[in-house]
Image (tube, rainbow, N blue to C red):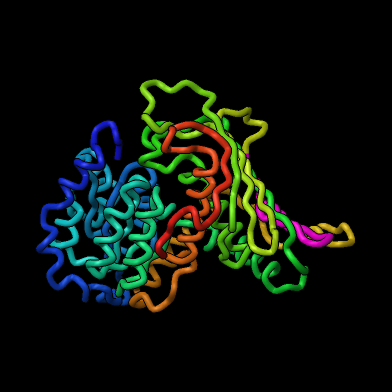
Amino acid sequence: MDRRDFTRREFLHKSAIGASALAIGGSSRARAAASKDEVVLGFIGVGGRGTTLLNKVVQIEAVRIGAVCDLKSDRVARAQRVAEKFKPKGYENFREMLEKEKLDGIIVATEVANHAKVVVPVLEAGFHCFSEKPMDATVEKVDQIVKAARKAKGIYQVGFQRRYSENFIKAMERIHSGELGKVTFLAGDWQFAGGVGGWVIDVEMSGGKLVEQACHHMDVMSWVMKDQHPLECVGMAAITVKHVNPPKYTAEDHSSVIFRFPGDVVFTYTHTSYTTQKFCGEKLWVYGEKWGINLSAGELYTPDDKTVKITEASDFYVGTNEQLESFVENVRKGGKEKPRSNAETARAATLMAIMGHAAFHNLATNKFEPRIIKWEDLGTTT
């Protein structure tokens, strides 16, 4: 969805229709698929990322797309073409879709700032839900989702796909087994040759680039630390490229943040747009006492300076197919398994990213200025 055409107020207004009808009898809807051979899914939000996920889901065996929804009619039509063999119904009002369609699960891929507005009603109506990352753009809305997920009859899975990559899973097993000793330091970066436009540069819609993009890496490092959250953070950032008609709260072009986890484990991270292609890529390094793991390369560096290949090298897309297949299979079984990426793990990653953004962008003054932000400063109620 494009913020230039639809504001969040318009989204709420259009989505409010049918809300009272949906609330009646909705809590019993989380269930196993009616047939072991078929899982019926609905999509809410079929823009760029939503269409990417839809193209992947239609290839999963024994899945049927029952309905698609977006505020923009042309996107609804495009999604219907992608899933043409299933003849899905098209909607511009997601509550109407939830009320009318018999679905086993919902995939949500709206803008970040619209996640809670969709996910909470989906969970409250009793549907199994897969939502793209991060959970939302503000602490308050993250808390809303967490509270809804903890009460929900259906599962809530979040699109942190590295949790479903065998590469990362195997590396985490080595780290968490204790065989290598204590984790002492963490480092990462993610460099992009170009920038992103549209709603992503609007902090109110995306939370900022660190939140919308780098939350993936926040999730990985929180995972390294056994899903603990950092205690404090400091950061710096700036805007270096002039945008045409920028939003009031324009996202950073590059940033550098430092987190401190329990046990005095420090994590340094740099996130950059508009750089040379030669610099592009991602780095995720875990340091130990005389050892290290390069998560992106899948390599273990031993105390005697040997390199041990533990997995294949990873990139951004690794784990995407696996996370969708895992969601489908879990829905097929009635949501009996706790997702690897769930409300609790995603909460730590999302709030960590929001914390990092707050450390360099003061929204009260709309200035980029370095600050120390402690976890308690976030004011989370969950």
Q: Position of residue 26 (x, y in %)?
A: 18, 70
Establish if 278 lies above or below 73. Answer: above
Q: Position of residue 96 (x, y in %)?
A: 14, 56
Residue 61 in view here:
no
Q: Please name the residue shown 43% across and 59% down the image.
A: 380
- The one nearer the camera, 93 or 311, is 93
Majority SS type along the magenta span: strand
Establish if 339 lies above or below 115. Answer: below
Task: Single out the residue that lies furthest toward the right.
Answer: 304
Establish if 236 lies above or below 162. Answer: above
Q: Position of residue 112 (x, y in %)?
A: 37, 47
Classify residue 280 by image quadrant: top right
Q: Please name the residue shown 70% across and 59% down the image.
A: 264
**The N terminus appears in which quarter of the rendering?**
top left
- The one nearer the camera, 53 or 112, is 112
Q: Please name the residue shown 42% across and 43% down the image.
A: 207
Classify residue 257 by image quadrant: top right
Q: Please name the residue shown 77% across and 69% down the image.
A: 181
Q: Give the side of residue 183 with respect to residue 98, left or right.
A: right
Establish if 82 lies above or below 380. Answer: above
**The C terminus appears in which quarter of the rendering?**
bottom left
The number of numbered discs placed on residues in the rendered structure image is 0
Q: Please tell me whether residue 295 belongs to the stretch shown in magenta.
A: yes
Residue 233 in view here:
yes
Q: Please tell me whether residue 353 belongs to the stretch shown in magenta.
A: no
Classify residue 278 by image quadrant: top right
What is the magenta range? 281-298
Q: Position of residue 57 (x, y in %)?
A: 37, 57
Q: Give the side of residue 220 with respect to residue 208, left or right.
A: right
